[in-house]
Amino acid sequence: MGLIDIAFILLSAVAVISGWRVFVTDSMVRASFLLLLSFVAVALIILLMAAPYIGVATIFMMAVEMMVMALFMVMFMMNPAGLNPMMMVHQNRFAIGAGVVAFAGLSLAALATDFVDNRVDPAKRVVHDLGIELLGPSMLTFETAGVTLLATMVGAVVLSARSGRFGASDEGSLPPGLEPGGEPAGRKPEESGGHHHHHHMHG
Amino acid sequence: MTQMLAILILLLFLTAGIAAAAMLDRAIPALVAGRPMKSSLSAPFAVAAAMAIAPKSDTEHPDRVGWVLAPILYFTLAAVGLSVVPLSPRLVAAPSEVGIVLWGACEALTVVAVFLHGWSANAPLPLMGAYRYVAIGLPAMLLSMFVLIGAALPAQSLGLVEIVESQRDVWNVVRQPAGLVLFLMLGLSVSLRGPFDYADPYDLAGGTQAEVSGAARLSWRLARLAMLVSVSAMTATVFLGGYLGPVLPGFVWLALKSALVLVALVAAGNWFARMPPARMMSFLWLALLPLSFLMLAAVGVELLLWG
């Protein structure tokens, strides 16, 4: 067993264990960063497979992606700071079923595939060739996917931002009460007629 | 063998750079204010020693793993980023054909390290620093990617040796002066400094380090300085021709140019005021990011016409 085999086994263990911890931890920020750790381990395995650009770019993109994901999840889910313990799993039965099917399918694919075993020639310009491929024959695919994703992200932010194009998005809405059935939390919406009713919730 | 030599030189470079940066941090404000600068030579060491033996403070329910790991991660990223900087065409600690992408990954993970440092403390001020930094640090980091691609275009390579070699005739600072300015801003952002210090500013009582004391605070400060040294070396390599220069050996030229960038960064950090976070965010997205696109397009047109 060579050094590369040992590195592969260690990195796979990190990827699998941190991937499992994502679902056991009780905080969104921790879950995001554990997922990041899992992706970084996979990216390092890609590096071992002599694909330097894809490996390093995976680390780069996952770092940005998981950071943004953590930030937005905390922002949109009203969990201050993501430090409040919360349940990270839902739809358990369906998830277990999907997990078993995915595991069986992927294992079957891995066992049935006849993996090629040819070493990459160190003199081969893999990054150059990848660049030619990405910006040559596959350019239309990549650009279409990229622009679509960008438009989706911008659209999602526009729709969810408070200062959307149709005015303040929370206009007329009430935040949930601090206790079940209690007074709405936060600032009271102002009356338009100039009357000062302070308590609307008699009931 | 040459790789070991490169690693040794870089370790020396990093240590000397951290010490020099700590001294400059005191000397430059003193110089501007006309105060004597003599104490700036020894004061950083005295402060570091005092910090190292100071008692440790604690908060309620911090994320211990994250809190301990954040400074280590930050320092490691500085060291990894520095490792791809070539000292001569053959003297590289970590030869990589995708050097600038690796540096980009270090920048991206820096945002994660800083956020983790502030978030793990489970206290208001560090958390505010962490969130502010993500909002400002991410667009600043995106911007630097376009700047680096602009520098990679004339070299037709993502490797740093090729980028330095492409500057034999004319340095990138002449070709893309705007790129250098934008990259210096990134330098201030990744080392949490002056106008881009949204993570550890005074108005948040030290931000992410507000609740940290003792050796943990010292390690965070060292990591910040290490990142400053690292980004200085990267700027010198990408824009000032790196190891290129007559007579003296390559790594001496690199050290001299990095020192120049270091002084410029420390001075800029002390000189410029910090904008409110919301205004800085608009400035980054609406002014600097389009500027970096324009710059990249200009480099492309230049290479098509005269390349």
Image: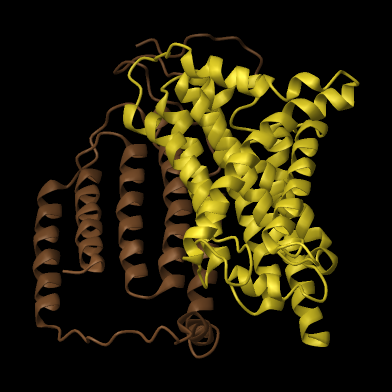
At which x and y percent is residue A5? 21, 67
Furthest residue toward right: B34
Q: Which residue occupies the foreground of this view, A5 or A103? A: A5
The residue sitting at 64% across, 67% down in the picture is: B88
Q: In which quarter of the image is the C terminus of chain B?
A: bottom right
Among the chains, which one is yellow? B
At which x and y percent is residue A133? 49, 87
All told, the count of numbered labels is 0
Display colour for chain A: brown
At which x and y percent is residue A143? 54, 77
In-image side of A40 versus A172 (left or right) = left
In-image side of A87 versus A64 (left or right) = left
Q: Which residue occupies the foreground of this view, B11 or A202? A: B11
Q: Which residue occupies the foreground of this view, B157 or A40? A: B157
User: Is residue A156 among what the camera can see?
Assistant: no
Can you say whether A165 is above or below B113 in the image?
Answer: below
User: Is residue B162 among what the camera can see?
Assistant: yes
Q: Which residue occupies the foreground of this view, B64 or A171? A: B64
The residue sitting at 52% across, 8% down in the picture is: A198
Can you say whether A143 is above or below B7 in the image?
Answer: below
Can you say whether A135 is above or below B108 in the image?
Answer: below
Q: In which quarter of the image is residue B281?
A: top right
The residue sitting at 73% across, 44% down in the picture is: B262
At which x and y percent is residue A144? 51, 77
The residue sitting at 79% across, 53% down in the picture is: B181
Furthest residue toward bottom: A137
What color scheme is it? by chain
